[in-house]
Amino acid sequence: MDAFFASVELLRRPDLRGLPVVVGGRRAGEGLRLRHYAGRGVVTTATYEARVFGVGSGMGLMKAAALAPDAILLPADFDAYRHYSRLFKAAVREVAPVIEDRGVDEIYIDLTDLPGDSAALGQRIKDAVRDATALSCSIGIAPNKLLAKLCSELDKPDGLTILHASEIAARIWPLSVARINGIGPKATQKLAALGIGTIAELAAADPGALKAGFGQSYGAWLHAVAHGHDDRPVVTSSEPRSISRETTFERDLHPRTDRPALSAIFTGLCERVAEDLARKGYLGRTVGIKLRYDDFHTVTRDLTLPGPVGTAVELRQAAGQCLRRVPLDRRLRLLGVRVSGLVTPEDAAAHAAESRSPQAELTLSD
């Protein structure tokens, strides 16, 4: 999806279309020019008009304000984004049902067994998404997931890019190695030190040198992806390992002097995690917390319970026990709650019934 969060916001604020808009921070800052913002919020996304100034996702809002002081700040509304995410994915499934979910705004689609021309299929998907959401998306159609991901970003916004294997050298090799999903900042920097900046240069690099510098597995992968090789299938189902919520405060809060505010935030996080569990149909066995102090030191604590839980009250009680196991003698900048060991209610009930069976009782008594 194109600048997804910002595009959803513009559905409600069409008067802001064509202007630099940044999504992030708290609701108290809604409609501010970035020049007037003060705090430690982070950019969630930005319109393309803001991106031309260098504003990007994950950037601190204060830095964004220095780059685009006249950009308009809107708070994030994740409930709205999840709603539109469900709408666009349902629309795609009507055309192409084999989908791998990659997050709130991105999917892989296997078109292999669908009849019709690739361009026509791509346009049908784009039209279905626009009809369902009034939003645009960009699609890359290629022989594999690696190349499709790269192509989906070549002609944003509202792009439809089709790549044949014979075109890799002309259209993919000139790109920076950083465009490949899986080559992060550290690997990019290390490759640059070897004189490798483009995918073409990576493709021309000696495979043995790559393995020597990056390890056997990653070095071999670098050589393969530079030549456009990727045999990963489209995976249509996967089980989440954990569900979490966290928040960074606008100002540091002290557990003693800001106890009411922290307590309300803590309870709110547990409530949102409980809502996420219910929506996705899970319970969890292990509840954990994450704290980041004002010196950026981060600690986590976990508690594994006798049985799976899912209500906000149960999560709050377990997370509170975790909280009692960490020092609370200095200010906090971040608080998070996490649930793992996920099971469905049906599996939990079956396990509970099995543990109550006569055989289980006999085993325990032995």
Image: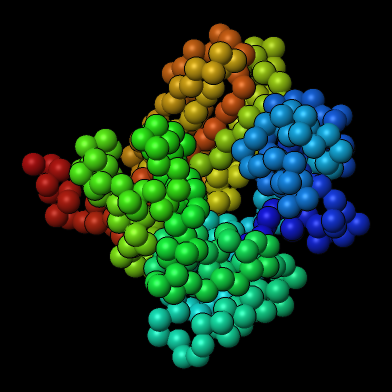
Vertical arrangement, residue 288 with respect to residue 57, above or below: above
Name the residue rendered at 56%, 13% in the picture: 295
Residue 153 appears at what percent x and percent y? 57, 59
Name the residue rendered at 12%, 49% in the picture: 362
Quadrant containing the N terminus in the rendered view: bottom right
Quick one: 168 or 19, which is closer to the camera? 168
Quick one: 98 or 123, which is closer to the camera? 123
Which residue reaches farthest left? Answer: 366
Quick one: 336 or 54, which is closer to the camera? 54
Residue 242 appears at what percent x and percent y? 43, 46
Q: Quadrant of residue 57?
A: top right
Which residue reaches farthest top? Answer: 329
Quadrant containing the C terminus in the rendered view: top left
- Going by the image, does 176 lie left or right of 350? right
Q: Tell me if I can see residue 303 in this picture.
A: yes
Residue 212 appears at what percent x and percent y? 22, 37
Name the residue rendered at 56%, 40% in the picture: 245
Q: Tell me if I can see residue 282 in this picture.
A: no
The type of colouring in the image is: rainbow
Name the residue rendered at 58%, 85% in the picture: 120
Residue 76 appears at what percent x and percent y? 72, 45
- Going by the image, does 112 lie left or right of 33? left
Vertical arrangement, residue 122 with respect to residue 356, above or below: below
Which residue reaches farthest bottom? Answer: 115
